[in-house]
Image (tube, rainbow, N blue to C red):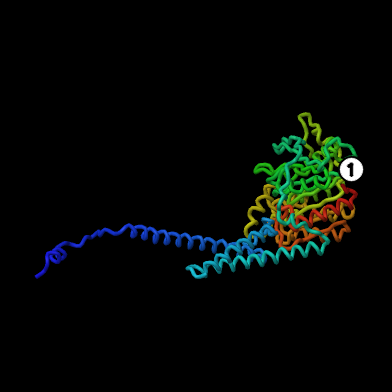
Amino acid sequence: MPTVKAIAEETTPEDPHPRRGPGSRSRRRGRAGRATGRGRCRKRDALALIGACAICLLSIGAITGIPVLSYSLMIGAWGLDAAAAIALLAVVAGWRALVRRREPGARRRLVTAGMLCLALVITGWMGAAQIRFAHARGVDLSVLGLTGIGQWGRGPDAAPVVLTDDASRQTLRAGIWYPRGKAPGDGGGGAPIVVLLHGGGWRTGDRDNPMTRIQADWLADQGYLAIALEYPLSLRDTPTWELAQSRLACSLAWVGAHAGEHGGDPGRLAVVGDSSGGHLALETAYRQALGGLDPSGPDAPADADGEALPACQGSAPTIRAVAITYPITDPAVFHDNPDPVMSGPVAGRARLYVGGGPAQYPERYASIDPTRKAAAAGAAAPPVLIVHGEDDHVVPVSGTRGLDAVMEAAGARHETIVVPYADHVFDLNGGSVASQIWRAKTLALLRGAGMGA
């Protein structure tokens, strides 16, 4: 006969929500927390793998020239800073793979570490190749400079207005960097002057462009009076292929008239420039050598009475040397850039500057082609230094090589250096290998031209 307890157990329905002890809830929370943590770790590992793959692909693209991927060279940062960053990431990834080798995702972490190590090897190989290239040309490199630390440059000490140009509706200024430790009026004779012309495809930029500021500040450190000149930028309704040259002639005359006020010696003047600024530096020097640089000529800006503006009422100082980086040496070649990404933007800037393409205006492109003038000027032109990146996507290095051949045949004084694994704007890091090569060679050029500071 069943007991009362047994009957009660049989007739009492099972509690669908049995009461559990206080430890069960904390165990559930612990399991949920561990699951969430594992999910976050998987996401972090996946993101790390994606990042490592991207860095590795960029490195491979840089060394092999794969279209699009090789644009990583353009940042000008394949130096110690990039190598150190990749090395740190590789160490962290390797440590995580080792410590957590028994946990899920270990293979993914190993692949991440391997990708970063491969990127480090490639980056180191390119850097070593550039360093060997520099040493072979007698250039001693600054290790601190290679990191990019302290290479951004300061702004100009003064920015006076040079002229107001009604034709382009632009006010043109000069950025002036005084020789370090020497202010105007300190005595001791005027400092040699280096005029800087900024890049930007004739469309953008000013006296305080990053590359211009970096090199102007460095030149001031070397004892030079650095003066960055602006020129009329092309507008959608105003091509400035004629205006830029005549206004630069006026600006040089202004430098000659006012250099003494800023502690400079206009009798010792050189011109440097990058990209489109390099093009204008060549054009200006060759025009002067051929007798065609007249600040007050028929193309000069005039006032309401038809008189040349005050800035244009003088003569331009003689240019004693030209030192340029990745210059546009042939505007037609620049327009016809075959690069799959840059061809459109580059051609657009050339058309804005000239008013159309080479097929439409061949005579205009011929008139602003410094390579043609180099052949005519020959040994009468000042000495020219060109440093160009071998992998330049924006300004094809073929133009520089063509100019080099013309200068050689014409008996011109020149030095052309094509740096491996270097792209456009390699001097965005003023301490990059290519930039340090330009600096060392520029100082030698200036001293050889009687412009030692």
Camera-side residue of 190 and 322: 190
| Residue at the image position 86 percent from the left and 39 percent from the top | 315
| Residue at the image position 76 percent from the left and 35 percent from the top | 160
Does residue 406 appear in this view? yes
Residue 72 sits in quarter = bottom right
Q: Residue furthest top?
A: 305
Please state if 1 lies on the left or on the right of 319 as rendered.
left
Does residue 392 appear in this view? no
Q: Position of residue 63 (x, y in %)?
A: 67, 66
Q: Position of residue 75 (x, y in %)?
A: 67, 55
Residue 87 sits in quarter = bottom right
Number of labels in the image equals 1
Q: Position of residue 248 (x, y in %)?
A: 78, 42
**Quadrant showing the N terminus:** bottom left
Above or below, comparing residue 26 to residue 258 in the picture: below
Above or below, comparing residue 97 to residue 162 in the picture: below
Q: Name the residue tied to disc 1.
A: 267
Please state if 248 lies on the left or on the right of 347 as rendered.
right
Camera-side residue of 144 and 96: 96
Q: Amino acid at mark 1?
A: Gly
- Find numbered disc 1 in the image and state the secondary structure of the residue it sits on: strand
Please state if 358 lies on the left or on the right of 49 as rendered.
right
Residue 21 sits in quarter = bottom left
Q: Label 1: how many residues lie within 10 Å, few (<14), some (14-19) or many (20+)?
A: some
